[in-house]
Amino acid sequence: MNKVTTICGWFVIILCLVVWAGWQFDIPILRTLLPSAPATTPLTMIILLLLSLALLVSHKIVTEPAAGQWIWVCWALAGIAVLTGVWIGLEYIFRFNSNLEFILYPELISQQGGTFPGRPSPHTTVSTILVGLSIATSPLSGQFYKQLTLFLSLTGLSIAWLALFGYASLTNPFYAVPGNPETGMSPLTALGIVGLVIGVMGLRPNEGFLRLLTDSSSGGQMVRILLPVAIVAPLIFGWIIFYGGVDEVLSSAMIFALSWGGTSLLFMALVIWQGFILHYRDMEREKAAEESRRLFHQLQQAEEKFRTILEAAPDAIVIVDEEGRIVLVNAQTEVLFGYKRDELINQPVEHLIPERFQDRHPQHRHQFSAAPRVRPMGAGLELSGLRQDGAEFPVEVSLSPFETAEGRLTTAIIRDVTENRRVADQIKRYNAQLKQQAEALEQSNLELQQFAYVASHDLQAPLRNINGFMQLLQHHYRGKLDEQADDWINRAVNSTRQLETVIHDILAYSRVDAQTRPFEPIPLNEIFDELTTMLAPIIQETRARITRDNLPTVIGDRSQLTQVLQNLIGNSLKYHGNLPPQIHVSAKNGDDNWLIAVHDNGIGIEPQQHQRIFEIFRRLHSQQEYPGSGIGLAVCRRVVQRHGGKIWVESELGRGSTFYFTISQIPQ
Ligand code: ADP
């Protein structure tokens, strides 16, 4: 678009060269364009040449920011042209003749007709002054100068335009002084001036009139349609009427009426057509405006919702731009960090981070923007926030990026985890304490076991001695001392035997964990059969009946499992009522264990004792009723536990008992 000025400038220069050739080689048609029209004088040609050069310089100034000093060249060229015009104006006004008109080709000019041969016509003078001034003001960029330029050039144009219209319709006064057709504006001059004015407008294609011409607005559209018609229609009418010979047929009143009527009709049609177009455009625009109002309202509502959610959030929410500057924060951020909102907006997010992390933080930010995704920040690290008062507090931060028209933003949701961390620390401390206690307990248990084992083991030998000597005493001195002595000796023998049983049982109990053997497959059938052989004397004595199912082979410690079955069957034999004992051992396949049951028809156990009988030394009867140490079931429980199982009893007083225990099928 900016080429317009250059083209116009060169168009006028070429036009001047054509006129010059007309004078130089005396070819009249090159000076006038139309045979009957006035010629462009050499002086006018010089003025037009100066103005076209000034226009090209102005173009340079407007398009090249560094070419400001060229304005003096522009003003010098335009100034000479304008001053020449003014001088001629003064000649007309004060009716004198300075011979400036004869500056070139004086002989040829002298042959010209007219009142002032060689002098530019008044029309030319005025319009070149106006256009010259407009070219001089055209490089200035102030709004006032722009409007002045437009005003001057359009006024100058209107004179040239009327002259051209005059030629089209042969209306003499439009281009010449009435009665003096030789002293009019030459059509070539008029074209030159039109070219200069278009060039001036082309200097700033994005402003003013040219902008309107190219704009997609309603105004632009209207100008584009009506203006060419307004320009061309009168020319065509004039041409048809005066060159087509209509004026010889119709009276001038008729012609006037016809041309006005025709123009009026044409413009009516155009105005109505344009009116419709503008009307529909306006309606569409109103619709679009309504729609955009609706969208704006929706947007406002959405924004309000967003704000409400943001402000109600229990965590601090900080939105940060790509440079790490804070764009938005919520109320909780103010509470958590102790800043006012205004103090944070536009500040680097590093403000909220303890100083020792600030240096590294921009690097972390860049890493995040290189691969942005929703994630917790500093996974595995303990992060801290920095309050305005300098206090630090532990935080958890999660980041999520999102794209906007202004670039990528990152939302950081920051949670104060002071309380969580405190609780976690406490739990950690408790756990450590608990572990310590458990270890201490285990240690003391171990020592206790060791003690029980060593004590019972070491007590066995002296006790065996005492027992031996007591039996010797009983054997050798029965009936030889008095009756009292015999009784005492008997009691001592019984007590030592009992003590021997207790110590034996304690030893068995402490051996469960102290003396272990590797687990191996153990066929329970075999164990059962060995036991019944071993217990045959008691079985016979009590006339007991012992039966079993087909028992499985389990994985475990042979001697310990033998002990369990021996204790349970032994108890069933011991705790029978008046009837001879009936004992049955059965087995059931569980999910991942075996369930073994020892059932008897003995005296039974009260439900409230079901748990307690498994405690060590817990007995329900006196030695006189049923002798025993109260350790057997405790041993059973420890062995079963060691094998990954449980032991319990189901029983009612006087209705027999069933002892159950499980053994894991998966080796422990
Ligand atoms: P002890 O038999 O040496 O007394 P136990 O630990 O084997 O010690 O048994 C603890 C108590 O459980 C016994 O004193 C007895 O009262 C009761 N008990 C054990 N087995 C049976 C059973 N089969 N029938 C009835 N009571 C039993």
Image: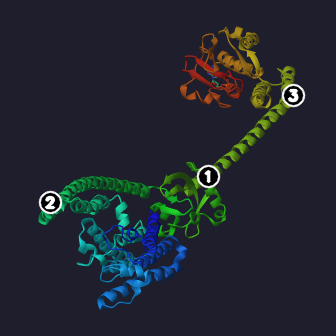
Q: Which mark is residue 249?
A: 2
Give the labeled residue for mark 3: 465
Q: In this rendering, which labeled residue sits more in front, label 1 or label 2? A: 2
Q: Closer to the camera, 228 or 328?
A: 228
Q: Amino acid at mark 3?
A: Asn
Measuring from the top left, give residue 656's x and y in whole percent: 58, 16
Q: CA distance from mark 2 to mark 3?
A: 172 Å
Say whether residue 37 is left or right of residue 447.
Answer: left
Q: CA distance from mark 1 to mark 2?
A: 87 Å
Q: Closer to the camera, 156 or 246?
A: 246
Vertical arrangement, residue 343 with respect to residue 501, above or below: below
Measuring from the top left, give residue 372's x and y in whole percent: 58, 50
Q: Find numbered disc 1 in the image and state the secondary structure of the residue it sits on.
A: helix
Q: Closer to the camera, 18 or 129?
A: 18
Q: Residue at coordinates 23% horizontally, 58% vertically from top-left?
A: 244
Q: Which mark is residue 26?
A: none
Q: Residues within 10 Å of mark 3 (few under 14, many from 20)?
A: few
Give the labeled residue for mark 1: 370
How many numbered circles does the render carry?
A: 3
Which quarter of the rendered picture does the C terminus lie within?
top right
Q: Amino acid at mark 2?
A: Val
Ligand 1, seen in the image, is in the quarter at top right
Q: Amino acid at mark 1?
A: Ala
Q: Quadrant of residue 357?
A: bottom right
